Amino acid sequence: MGGGTDELLGRGSVTIAEQPVRFATRHAELFVYLLALAGADGLARDDVISALWPEVELHDARPRLRTALWQVRRALGEHAWRIARERGVVLFDLDGVRLDVAPDRPIRRAELLIGWNVSLPQALLDRVA
């Protein structure tokens, strides 16, 4: 998101070219934050599903994931290319993106995604203190 920011502490926000990005659903917005937290490794498709729709069977939630991916790409506009799926992993190209968390320091759980009711996948819990 060249020149943009993705804020993960507190209630998050995404800005591209100094314009706030508006997501169609809270699931799409949370999806972006989870991917940003995952960094270059991305998140396994099933981990995303479990975080966003914990009460839904994986098979039944896959169409929801496709819809959320579409919503994220639509919201990102010309930066939609940053979202990719490869071998069951969803990736967010963060090159040129500024985050309000440092990728090399543990994130305190109390600081993270305040106001969101989400169970973080194990891959993200390893980054959270």
Image (tube, rainbow, N blue to C red):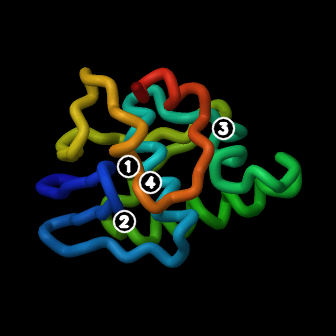
Q: Is residue 95 left or right of residue 39?
A: left
Q: Helix, strand, or loop for circle 3?
A: helix
What whole-number distance in Å separates the C-alpha atoms at marks 2 and 4? 10 Å
Q: Quadrant of the N terminus?
A: bottom left
Amino acid beneath label 4: Val
Residue 47: numbered disc: 3
Q: Which residue is mark 1?
A: 82
Mark 2 secondary-structure assignment:
helix
Side of 75 relative to 85 (left or right): left
Lower position in the chain sequence, tag 2 or tag 4: 4
Q: Quadrant of residue 127?
A: top left
- In-image side of 79 versus 66 (left or right): left
Q: N-terminal of the two: label 1 or label 4? A: 4
Along the line of sight, which residue is nearer the eye, 117 or 65?
117
Q: Which mark is residue 109?
A: none
Which is closer to the viewer, label 3 or label 2?
3
* Distance between the alpha carbons at the discs numbered 1 and 4: 11 Å
Q: Is residue 12 above or below residue 57?
A: below
User: Closer to the observer: label 3 or label 1?
Assistant: 3
Q: Kindly report the distance in space between the C-alpha atoms of the residues bearing marks 3 and 4.
A: 14 Å
Residue to which mark 4 is pinned: 32
Query: What is the C-alpha distance between the residues marked 3 and 1?
Result: 19 Å
Identify the residue under disc 2. Answer: 76
**SS type, badge 4:** helix
CB contact under 8 Å: marks 1 and 4: no
